[in-house]
Image: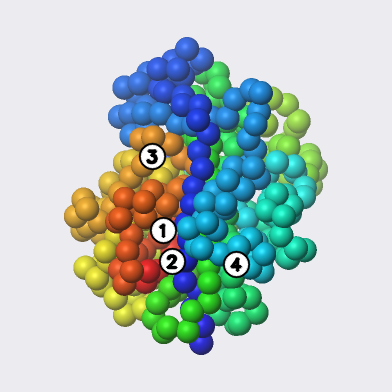
Amino acid sequence: MKYAKIIGVGHYVPDNVVTNHDLVKMMDTSDEWIQERSGIIERRWIKEPYEQSTAHMGFEAAKMAIQRAGITNDEIELIVFATLSSDYYFPGPGVKIQQLLGIGNVGAIDVRAQCSGFIYAISVADQFVRTGMYKTVLVVGSETHSIGLDKTTRGRTTAVLFGDGAGAVVLRASETPGVGILSTHLHSQGEHAEKLFLKAPGTGRDGIIYPGIEQDVDNIYPVMDGQFVFKNAVVRMEEAVKEALNANGYKVSDLDMVLAHQANLRISQFVQRKLGLPDDKMYSNIQKYGNTTSATLPILMSELWEQGKITEGKLYALVAFGSGFTWASALIKW
Ligand code: ACO
Protein backbone atom coordinates (compact mmCIF):
# COMPACT_ATOMS: atom_id res chain seq x y z
CA MET A 1 0.00 0.00 0.00
CA LYS A 2 1.08 3.55 -0.66
CA TYR A 3 1.33 6.29 1.96
CA ALA A 4 0.88 10.02 1.36
CA LYS A 5 3.92 11.89 2.58
CA ILE A 6 4.00 15.66 3.07
CA ILE A 7 6.92 16.85 0.94
CA GLY A 8 6.32 20.61 1.05
CA VAL A 9 4.48 23.05 3.28
CA GLY A 10 3.87 26.79 2.87
CA HIS A 11 1.79 29.64 4.16
CA TYR A 12 0.77 33.21 3.47
CA VAL A 13 -0.78 35.91 5.62
CA PRO A 14 -1.73 39.46 4.57
CA ASP A 15 0.65 42.25 5.64
CA ASN A 16 -2.08 44.24 7.36
CA VAL A 17 -1.82 43.67 11.13
CA VAL A 18 -4.93 44.48 13.17
CA THR A 19 -4.23 44.64 16.88
CA ASN A 20 -6.71 44.38 19.73
CA HIS A 21 -6.19 48.13 20.21
CA ASP A 22 -7.33 48.70 16.62
CA LEU A 23 -10.53 46.76 17.40
CA VAL A 24 -11.23 48.99 20.40
CA LYS A 25 -11.72 51.83 17.91
CA MET A 26 -14.45 49.82 16.13
CA MET A 27 -16.40 48.20 18.99
CA ASP A 28 -16.84 48.07 22.74
CA THR A 29 -14.05 45.66 23.65
CA SER A 30 -10.61 45.72 25.25
CA ASP A 31 -7.17 44.24 24.77
CA GLU A 32 -7.45 42.67 28.24
CA TRP A 33 -10.80 40.95 27.47
CA ILE A 34 -9.58 39.52 24.16
CA GLN A 35 -6.24 38.33 25.51
CA GLU A 36 -7.67 36.86 28.68
CA ARG A 37 -10.53 35.01 26.94
CA SER A 38 -8.77 33.91 23.76
CA GLY A 39 -5.01 34.60 23.90
CA ILE A 40 -5.22 36.69 20.71
CA ILE A 41 -3.06 39.83 20.50
CA GLU A 42 -3.38 40.60 16.78
CA ARG A 43 -4.63 39.13 13.54
CA ARG A 44 -4.17 39.80 9.80
CA TRP A 45 -7.08 41.24 7.81
CA ILE A 46 -6.98 42.02 4.11
CA LYS A 47 -7.76 45.65 3.41
CA GLU A 48 -8.85 47.92 0.58
CA PRO A 49 -7.86 48.10 -2.20
CA TYR A 50 -8.22 44.34 -1.96
CA GLU A 51 -5.20 42.65 -3.50
CA GLN A 52 -5.93 39.34 -1.81
CA SER A 53 -8.76 36.84 -1.71
CA THR A 54 -9.21 33.32 -0.40
CA ALA A 55 -8.04 31.85 -3.73
CA HIS A 56 -5.16 34.31 -4.12
CA MET A 57 -3.84 33.77 -0.59
CA GLY A 58 -4.15 30.02 -1.19
CA PHE A 59 -2.13 30.50 -4.36
CA GLU A 60 0.68 32.28 -2.47
CA ALA A 61 0.79 29.51 0.14
CA ALA A 62 0.71 26.86 -2.57
CA LYS A 63 3.63 28.46 -4.44
CA MET A 64 5.73 28.23 -1.26
CA ALA A 65 4.71 24.62 -0.60
CA ILE A 66 5.45 23.62 -4.20
CA GLN A 67 8.83 25.37 -4.17
CA ARG A 68 9.80 23.72 -0.86
CA ALA A 69 8.65 20.35 -2.23
CA GLY A 70 11.05 20.85 -5.14
CA ILE A 71 8.45 19.96 -7.73
CA THR A 72 6.96 21.83 -10.66
CA ASN A 73 3.33 22.95 -10.82
CA ASP A 74 2.53 20.52 -13.60
CA GLU A 75 3.36 17.53 -11.39
CA ILE A 76 0.19 18.23 -9.40
CA GLU A 77 -2.55 15.78 -10.33
CA LEU A 78 -5.33 16.92 -8.00
CA ILE A 79 -6.21 20.01 -5.91
CA VAL A 80 -8.17 19.79 -2.67
CA PHE A 81 -9.14 23.21 -1.27
CA ALA A 82 -10.70 23.73 2.16
CA THR A 83 -12.49 26.96 3.00
CA LEU A 84 -15.68 28.43 4.42
CA SER A 85 -15.03 31.77 2.73
CA SER A 86 -14.96 31.06 -0.98
CA ASP A 87 -14.30 34.03 -3.31
CA TYR A 88 -17.54 33.21 -5.08
CA TYR A 89 -20.50 31.37 -3.61
CA PHE A 90 -19.81 29.05 -6.52
CA PRO A 91 -17.55 27.89 -8.03
CA GLY A 92 -15.25 27.25 -5.09
CA PRO A 93 -11.63 28.45 -5.02
CA GLY A 94 -10.19 25.08 -6.11
CA VAL A 95 -10.71 25.99 -9.75
CA LYS A 96 -9.30 29.51 -9.30
CA ILE A 97 -6.07 28.18 -7.84
CA GLN A 98 -5.80 25.70 -10.71
CA GLN A 99 -5.99 28.67 -13.07
CA LEU A 100 -3.55 30.80 -11.01
CA LEU A 101 -1.00 27.99 -10.86
CA GLY A 102 -1.35 27.58 -14.60
CA ILE A 103 -1.51 23.82 -14.39
CA GLY A 104 -3.44 21.54 -16.71
CA ASN A 105 -7.08 20.66 -16.33
CA VAL A 106 -6.64 18.57 -13.21
CA GLY A 107 -9.53 17.96 -10.81
CA ALA A 108 -10.23 20.49 -8.08
CA ILE A 109 -12.29 19.52 -5.04
CA ASP A 110 -13.64 22.06 -2.55
CA VAL A 111 -14.07 20.91 1.03
CA ARG A 112 -16.41 22.61 3.48
CA ALA A 113 -15.77 21.48 7.02
CA GLN A 114 -14.94 24.84 8.65
CA CYS A 115 -12.23 24.59 11.32
CA SER A 116 -11.81 20.88 10.59
CA GLY A 117 -11.54 21.65 6.87
CA PHE A 118 -7.81 21.14 6.49
CA ILE A 119 -7.83 17.69 8.12
CA TYR A 120 -10.88 16.73 6.07
CA ALA A 121 -9.00 17.93 2.96
CA ILE A 122 -5.84 15.94 3.64
CA SER A 123 -8.04 12.94 4.39
CA VAL A 124 -9.66 13.27 0.95
CA ALA A 125 -6.24 13.66 -0.68
CA ASP A 126 -4.83 10.74 1.30
CA GLN A 127 -7.49 8.36 -0.03
CA PHE A 128 -6.58 9.18 -3.64
CA VAL A 129 -2.89 8.62 -2.94
CA ARG A 130 -3.43 5.38 -1.00
CA THR A 131 -5.45 3.84 -3.82
CA GLY A 132 -2.76 4.79 -6.32
CA MET A 133 -5.06 7.04 -8.35
CA TYR A 134 -2.86 10.13 -7.90
CA LYS A 135 0.79 10.46 -6.91
CA THR A 136 1.02 14.19 -6.16
CA VAL A 137 -1.81 16.21 -4.61
CA LEU A 138 -1.95 19.85 -3.52
CA VAL A 139 -3.99 20.54 -0.38
CA VAL A 140 -4.86 24.13 0.52
CA GLY A 141 -6.66 25.80 3.42
CA SER A 142 -7.43 29.50 3.06
CA GLU A 143 -9.83 31.95 4.63
CA THR A 144 -10.91 35.56 4.26
CA HIS A 145 -12.92 36.10 7.42
CA SER A 146 -12.46 39.85 7.72
CA ILE A 147 -14.98 40.89 5.09
CA GLY A 148 -17.72 38.71 6.62
CA LEU A 149 -17.53 39.86 10.24
CA ASP A 150 -19.78 42.29 12.07
CA LYS A 151 -17.16 44.76 13.29
CA THR A 152 -19.53 46.60 15.58
CA THR A 153 -20.22 45.91 19.26
CA ARG A 154 -23.08 43.61 18.23
CA GLY A 155 -20.59 41.24 16.57
CA ARG A 156 -17.76 41.51 19.08
CA THR A 157 -18.03 37.93 20.37
CA THR A 158 -16.98 36.55 16.99
CA ALA A 159 -15.29 39.48 15.23
CA VAL A 160 -12.34 39.60 17.63
CA LEU A 161 -11.54 35.91 17.14
CA PHE A 162 -11.05 35.54 13.40
CA GLY A 163 -8.19 36.33 11.01
CA ASP A 164 -7.28 35.90 7.34
CA GLY A 165 -4.56 33.68 5.90
CA ALA A 166 -3.68 30.54 3.98
CA GLY A 167 -1.58 27.41 4.19
CA ALA A 168 -0.82 24.56 1.82
CA VAL A 169 0.90 21.20 1.63
CA VAL A 170 2.03 18.96 -1.20
CA LEU A 171 1.37 15.25 -0.69
CA ARG A 172 3.35 12.66 -2.61
CA ALA A 173 2.93 8.89 -2.75
CA SER A 174 5.62 6.98 -0.90
CA GLU A 175 6.28 3.25 -0.86
CA THR A 176 7.94 3.40 2.58
CA PRO A 177 5.55 1.74 5.02
CA GLY A 178 4.67 3.60 8.20
CA VAL A 179 5.83 7.01 6.94
CA GLY A 180 3.46 9.80 5.96
CA ILE A 181 -0.20 10.13 6.86
CA LEU A 182 -0.87 7.07 9.00
CA SER A 183 -4.57 7.70 9.50
CA THR A 184 -7.31 10.30 9.48
CA HIS A 185 -10.51 10.20 11.51
CA LEU A 186 -13.44 12.45 10.62
CA HIS A 187 -16.55 13.22 12.66
CA SER A 188 -19.59 15.46 12.52
CA GLN A 189 -22.70 16.18 14.58
CA GLY A 190 -25.26 18.20 12.62
CA GLU A 191 -27.63 18.57 15.56
CA HIS A 192 -25.31 21.37 16.69
CA ALA A 193 -25.07 23.14 13.32
CA GLU A 194 -26.83 26.20 14.69
CA LYS A 195 -24.37 26.59 17.60
CA LEU A 196 -21.91 28.21 15.21
CA PHE A 197 -23.26 29.15 11.83
CA LEU A 198 -23.95 31.74 9.21
CA LYS A 199 -27.59 31.59 8.07
CA ALA A 200 -27.48 33.71 4.96
CA PRO A 201 -26.25 34.19 2.32
CA GLY A 202 -27.09 30.58 1.74
CA THR A 203 -29.71 28.93 -0.39
CA GLY A 204 -31.91 27.98 2.57
CA ARG A 205 -34.97 30.20 2.70
CA ASP A 206 -37.85 30.64 5.10
CA GLY A 207 -40.09 27.62 4.62
CA ILE A 208 -40.85 24.15 5.89
CA ILE A 209 -37.28 22.91 6.27
CA TYR A 210 -35.75 26.13 7.58
CA PRO A 211 -38.46 28.15 9.27
CA GLY A 212 -37.55 31.69 10.23
CA ILE A 213 -34.65 32.41 7.93
CA GLU A 214 -34.86 35.99 6.86
CA GLN A 215 -32.48 37.97 4.72
CA ASP A 216 -31.80 40.68 7.28
CA VAL A 217 -28.69 41.99 8.96
CA ASP A 218 -28.92 39.50 11.82
CA ASN A 219 -28.47 36.65 9.37
CA ILE A 220 -25.50 37.74 7.33
CA TYR A 221 -22.88 37.45 10.10
CA PRO A 222 -21.70 34.39 12.01
CA VAL A 223 -23.64 33.45 15.14
CA MET A 224 -21.92 31.46 17.87
CA ASP A 225 -22.82 29.99 21.23
CA GLY A 226 -19.21 30.38 22.40
CA GLN A 227 -19.41 28.52 25.69
CA PHE A 228 -21.23 25.54 24.17
CA VAL A 229 -18.66 25.37 21.36
CA PHE A 230 -15.83 25.63 23.88
CA LYS A 231 -17.15 22.77 26.06
CA ASN A 232 -17.59 20.46 23.08
CA ALA A 233 -14.25 21.40 21.53
CA VAL A 234 -12.17 20.36 24.53
CA VAL A 235 -13.92 16.98 24.81
CA ARG A 236 -13.85 16.14 21.10
CA MET A 237 -10.26 17.25 20.51
CA GLU A 238 -8.92 15.03 23.29
CA GLU A 239 -11.07 12.13 22.03
CA ALA A 240 -9.87 12.59 18.45
CA VAL A 241 -6.16 12.57 19.38
CA LYS A 242 -6.65 9.39 21.41
CA GLU A 243 -8.63 7.80 18.58
CA ALA A 244 -5.76 8.47 16.18
CA LEU A 245 -3.19 7.03 18.59
CA ASN A 246 -5.28 3.93 19.40
CA ALA A 247 -5.86 3.19 15.72
CA ASN A 248 -2.10 3.06 15.16
CA GLY A 249 -0.96 1.40 18.37
CA TYR A 250 0.70 4.53 19.79
CA LYS A 251 0.47 6.24 23.19
CA VAL A 252 0.36 9.95 24.01
CA SER A 253 3.99 9.71 25.17
CA ASP A 254 5.02 8.55 21.66
CA LEU A 255 3.93 11.89 20.18
CA ASP A 256 6.57 14.47 19.34
CA MET A 257 3.97 17.19 18.99
CA VAL A 258 0.25 17.88 18.75
CA LEU A 259 -0.74 20.52 16.19
CA ALA A 260 -4.10 21.71 17.42
CA HIS A 261 -6.53 23.97 15.64
CA GLN A 262 -6.10 27.52 16.95
CA ALA A 263 -9.61 28.63 17.97
CA ASN A 264 -8.78 29.84 21.43
CA LEU A 265 -5.58 29.58 23.47
CA ARG A 266 -7.63 28.39 26.43
CA ILE A 267 -9.04 25.49 24.39
CA SER A 268 -5.51 24.41 23.38
CA GLN A 269 -4.24 24.70 26.96
CA PHE A 270 -7.19 22.67 28.22
CA VAL A 271 -6.56 19.90 25.67
CA GLN A 272 -2.83 19.97 26.44
CA ARG A 273 -3.54 19.47 30.16
CA LYS A 274 -6.03 16.68 29.52
CA LEU A 275 -3.52 14.85 27.33
CA GLY A 276 -0.73 15.51 29.83
CA LEU A 277 1.55 17.04 27.21
CA PRO A 278 4.56 19.19 28.16
CA ASP A 279 4.76 22.73 26.74
CA ASP A 280 7.30 21.83 24.06
CA LYS A 281 4.84 19.34 22.51
CA MET A 282 2.08 21.82 21.76
CA TYR A 283 2.67 25.18 20.07
CA SER A 284 0.32 28.08 19.56
CA ASN A 285 0.39 30.93 17.08
CA ILE A 286 -3.16 32.19 17.72
CA GLN A 287 -1.57 35.20 19.45
CA LYS A 288 -0.46 36.50 16.00
CA TYR A 289 -3.20 35.32 13.67
CA GLY A 290 -6.43 34.63 15.56
CA ASN A 291 -8.56 31.78 14.26
CA THR A 292 -7.93 31.32 10.54
CA THR A 293 -10.20 28.24 10.37
CA SER A 294 -9.06 25.86 7.60
CA ALA A 295 -5.80 27.81 7.16
CA THR A 296 -4.79 27.44 10.80
CA LEU A 297 -3.15 24.03 10.75
CA PRO A 298 -1.08 24.45 7.58
CA ILE A 299 0.07 27.92 8.76
CA LEU A 300 1.12 26.40 12.09
CA MET A 301 2.78 23.47 10.34
CA SER A 302 4.66 25.75 7.96
CA GLU A 303 5.95 27.96 10.77
CA LEU A 304 7.04 24.98 12.86
CA TRP A 305 8.78 23.48 9.83
CA GLU A 306 10.64 26.79 9.28
CA GLN A 307 11.75 26.74 12.91
CA GLY A 308 13.12 23.20 12.50
CA LYS A 309 10.54 21.76 14.88
CA ILE A 310 9.07 19.42 12.29
CA THR A 311 11.61 16.87 11.14
CA GLU A 312 11.89 13.44 9.54
CA GLY A 313 10.85 10.42 11.54
CA LYS A 314 8.87 12.30 14.18
CA LEU A 315 5.27 11.64 15.09
CA TYR A 316 2.68 14.44 14.90
CA ALA A 317 -1.03 14.50 15.66
CA LEU A 318 -3.22 17.10 13.96
CA VAL A 319 -6.54 17.81 15.61
CA ALA A 320 -9.37 20.27 14.96
CA PHE A 321 -12.90 21.08 16.01
CA GLY A 322 -15.36 23.60 14.66
CA SER A 323 -18.65 24.59 13.17
CA GLY A 324 -20.89 21.73 12.08
CA PHE A 325 -19.98 20.46 14.56
CA THR A 326 -17.10 18.80 12.78
CA TRP A 327 -13.98 17.42 14.34
CA ALA A 328 -11.08 15.37 13.02
CA SER A 329 -7.59 14.10 13.65
CA ALA A 330 -4.66 12.93 11.57
CA LEU A 331 -1.59 11.03 12.68
CA ILE A 332 1.51 11.78 10.64
CA LYS A 333 4.97 10.23 10.71
CA TRP A 334 7.02 12.90 8.98
N1 ACO B 1 -15.16 42.27 24.27
C1 ACO B 1 -15.66 42.54 25.50
N2 ACO B 1 -16.68 41.84 26.04
C2 ACO B 1 -17.18 40.82 25.31
C3 ACO B 1 -16.71 40.52 24.03
C4 ACO B 1 -15.66 41.29 23.51
N3 ACO B 1 -15.12 41.07 22.30
N4 ACO B 1 -17.41 39.48 23.54
C5 ACO B 1 -18.31 39.14 24.48
N5 ACO B 1 -18.17 39.95 25.54
C6 ACO B 1 -18.93 39.94 26.81
C7 ACO B 1 -20.25 39.21 26.69
O1 ACO B 1 -21.24 40.09 26.20
C8 ACO B 1 -20.50 38.81 28.11
O2 ACO B 1 -20.98 39.90 28.83
P1 ACO B 1 -22.13 39.70 29.97
O3 ACO B 1 -21.53 38.80 30.99
O4 ACO B 1 -22.37 41.09 30.44
O5 ACO B 1 -23.28 39.07 29.25
C9 ACO B 1 -19.11 38.50 28.66
O6 ACO B 1 -18.20 39.17 27.77
C10 ACO B 1 -18.77 37.02 28.69
O7 ACO B 1 -19.08 36.45 27.42
P2 ACO B 1 -18.94 34.92 27.17
O8 ACO B 1 -19.43 34.59 25.79
O9 ACO B 1 -19.54 34.16 28.31
O10 ACO B 1 -17.36 34.75 27.24
P3 ACO B 1 -16.50 33.43 27.20
O11 ACO B 1 -15.62 33.39 28.37
O12 ACO B 1 -17.31 32.22 26.90
O13 ACO B 1 -15.56 33.67 25.93
C11 ACO B 1 -15.33 33.05 23.61
C12 ACO B 1 -16.13 33.84 24.66
C13 ACO B 1 -13.94 33.62 23.53
C14 ACO B 1 -16.03 33.21 22.28
C15 ACO B 1 -15.26 31.55 24.00
O14 ACO B 1 -16.52 31.10 24.42
C16 ACO B 1 -14.76 30.66 22.90
O15 ACO B 1 -13.62 30.74 22.48
N6 ACO B 1 -15.56 29.71 22.41
C17 ACO B 1 -15.15 28.74 21.40
C18 ACO B 1 -14.91 29.35 20.04
C19 ACO B 1 -14.54 28.24 19.06
O16 ACO B 1 -13.87 27.27 19.40
N7 ACO B 1 -15.03 28.28 17.85
C20 ACO B 1 -14.84 27.11 17.01
C21 ACO B 1 -14.08 27.33 15.87
S1 ACO B 1 -14.74 28.49 14.80
C22 ACO B 1 -15.26 27.68 13.34
O17 ACO B 1 -15.41 26.50 13.23
C23 ACO B 1 -15.63 28.59 12.22
Alpha carbon distance from label 1 to label 2: 7 Å
Closer to the camera in the image, 293 or 46: 46
Alpha carbon distance from label 4 to label 2: 17 Å
Ligand 1: image quarter: top left
**Badge 4, how many Cα within 10 Å: few under 14, some, many 20+?**
many
Alpha carbon distance from label 4 to label 3: 27 Å
Would you name the residue on which mark 3 appears? 286
Amino acid type at image mark 4: Val
Q: Measuring 43% from the left and 73% from the top, which residue is drawn there?
A: 180
Amino acid type at image mark 3: Ile
Residue 147 occupies which quadrant of the picture? top right
79 lies above or below 161: below
Q: Is residue 152 visible?
A: yes
Residue 81 drawn at (x, y percent): 62, 55
Amino acid type at image mark 2: Ala
Residue 197 drawn at (x, y percent): 60, 42
Q: Measuring 51% from the left and 15% from the top, which residue is drawn there?
A: 26
Label 4 near ligand 1 (CB < 8 Å): no
On residue 319, the disc is 1
Alpha carbon distance from label 3 to label 1: 15 Å
Q: Is residue 37 visible?
A: no
Q: Are marks 3 and 2 in contact (CB under 8 Å)?
A: no
Would you name the residue on which mark 2 appears? 330
For the view shown, which residue lies furthest in the top direction? 25
Q: Quadrant of the C terminus?
A: bottom left
Total labels: the figure holds: 4
